[in-house]
Amino acid sequence: MDLYSSFIHNCQKLEAAKISLRQKAKMKFIVLAVTVGLTLLLGVHAMPANRLSCYRKTLKDRNCHNLPEGVTDLTKIDVNVQDHFWDGKGCEMICYCNFSELLCCPKDIFFGPKISFVIPCNNH
């Protein structure tokens, strides 16, 4: 083998090695992209779907003064806190009577996390 043939042969090997490295890098990128994509996709579905959110309840007689007699699952929070009620048996949801409807939210959303822990809850 002469010097020129040896040089061409080495160049071909080098080019093949470059292509191999590019293919490996491309495969690593694809694997990384698929892994990140699946992690994000599964991470979104893994979040709790039963997280409490705000909702409204329309009052039958459109009057806040008859509460909680008109609605069985409401309990007054405190005599000093007007128009605010616990919804249900626990102390997670708070409702505010606003004219003809109740606006109900989780206590952390309603009052904020710094205040909600001091709201009296006697677990009715």
Image (cartoon, rainbow, N blue to C red):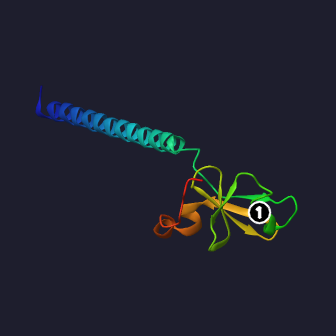
Which residue is rendered at x = 56% and y = 53% of the image? 123
Q: Residues within 10 Å of mark 1 (few under 14, many from 20)?
A: some
Q: Nearer the viewer, residue 47 or 88?
A: 88
User: Image quadrant of residue 111?
Assistant: bottom right
**Apparent side of residue 119 relative to residue 57 in the rendered image (left or right):** left
Query: At numbered mark 1, what does the secondary structure look like: helix, strand or loop?
Result: loop
Q: Residue furthest top?
A: 1
Which residue is rendered at x = 82% and y = 60% of the image? 59
Q: Measured along the vertical axis of the image, is residue 62 above or below residue 51?
A: below
Q: Measured along the vertical axis of the image, is residue 6 above or below residue 82?
A: above
**Apparent side of residue 104 relative to residue 36 in the rendered image (left or right):** right
Which image quarter is the N terminus in? top left
Q: Nearer the viewer, residue 9 or 114?
A: 114
**Apparent side of residue 14 relative to residue 25 in the rendered image (left or right):** left
* Residue type of the residue flagged with mark 1: Leu
User: Image quadrant of residue 33?
Assistant: top left
Q: Position of residue 74 (x, y in %)?
A: 70, 56
Q: Residue furthest right?
A: 61
Q: How many marks?
A: 1
Q: Measured along the vertical axis of the image, is residue 14 above or below residue 104?
A: above
User: Image quadrant of residue 63?
Assistant: bottom right
Q: Position of residue 52 (x, y in %)?
A: 60, 52
Label 1 sits on residue: 67
Q: Position of residue 101 (x, y in %)?
A: 79, 64
Which residue is rendered at x = 57% and y = 63% of the image? 109
Q: Nearer the viewer, residue 6 or 76?
A: 76
Q: Position of residue 39 (x, y in %)?
A: 44, 41
